[in-house]
Image: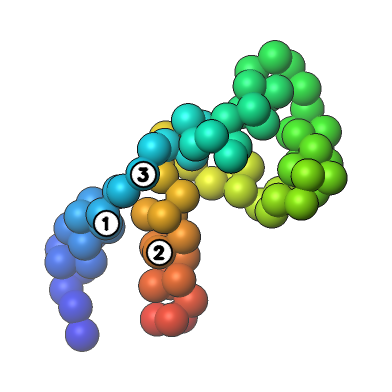
C-alpha cells in the first residue's frame, strides 16, 4: 500500500505531454464557443454532432488530454 504523501505526490508527477485541452487543435473551437457565451449543453451537442466525445468538456482545460485520461484509467484500474 502507498502512503498518503506518496499518492498526493504522484498526482503532481503525472506526465503532462501535449497541449492543454483548450489549445488542442481538435477541441479549441469548442472552448472558443464557450468563451463566446454558448451554453455548455450547446457545445456538448456540437461535439456529439461532430463525432467527438462530449464528456471532454468536463475535463480540466488547462491540462493535456493524455495526462487526464491516464489519470482516469489509473482510478478505474485501482478502483
Q: Is residue 41 left or right of residue 69?
A: right
Q: Residue furthest top?
A: 36
The structure residue drawn at horizontal position 84% and vertical position 45%, both measured from the top left corner, is 49
Q: Is residue 19 visible?
A: yes
Q: Is residue 17 left or right of residue 9?
A: right
The disc placed on residue 36 is none
Element carrying mark 2: helix
Circles 1 and 3: CB atoms closer than 8 Å:
no
* Tag nearer the camera, 1 or 3: 3
Residue 75 picture location, percent across and down: 43, 72
In this view, 78 is above or below 46: below
Q: CA distance from mark 3 to mark 2?
A: 13 Å
The structure residue drawn at horizontal position 39% and vertical position 38%, both measured from the top left corner, is 19
Residue 30 picture location, percent across and down: 67, 31
**Dot 3 corresponds to which residue?**
18
Circles 3 and 2: CB atoms closer than 8 Å:
no
Q: CA distance from mark 2 to mark 1?
A: 8 Å
Badge 2: residue crowd in 10 Å (few <14, some 14–19, many ≥20): some
Circles 2 and 1: CB atoms closer than 8 Å:
yes
* Tag nearer the camera, 3 or 2: 3
The disc placed on residue 70 is 2
Amino acid at each position: 500500500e502507498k502512503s498518503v504523501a506518496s499518492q498526493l505526490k504522484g498526482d503532481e508527477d503525472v506526465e503532462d505531454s501535449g497541449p492543454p485541452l483548450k489549445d488542442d487543435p481538435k477541441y479549441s473551437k469548442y472552448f472558443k464557443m464557450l468563451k463566446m457565451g454558448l451554453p455548455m449543453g450547446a457545445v456538448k451537442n456540437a461535439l456529439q454532432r461532430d463525432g467527438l466525445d462530449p464528456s471532454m468538456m468536463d475535463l480540466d482545460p488547462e491540462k493535456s488530454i493524455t495526462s487526464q485520461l491516464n489519470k482516469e484509467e489509473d482510478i478505474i484500474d485501482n478502483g
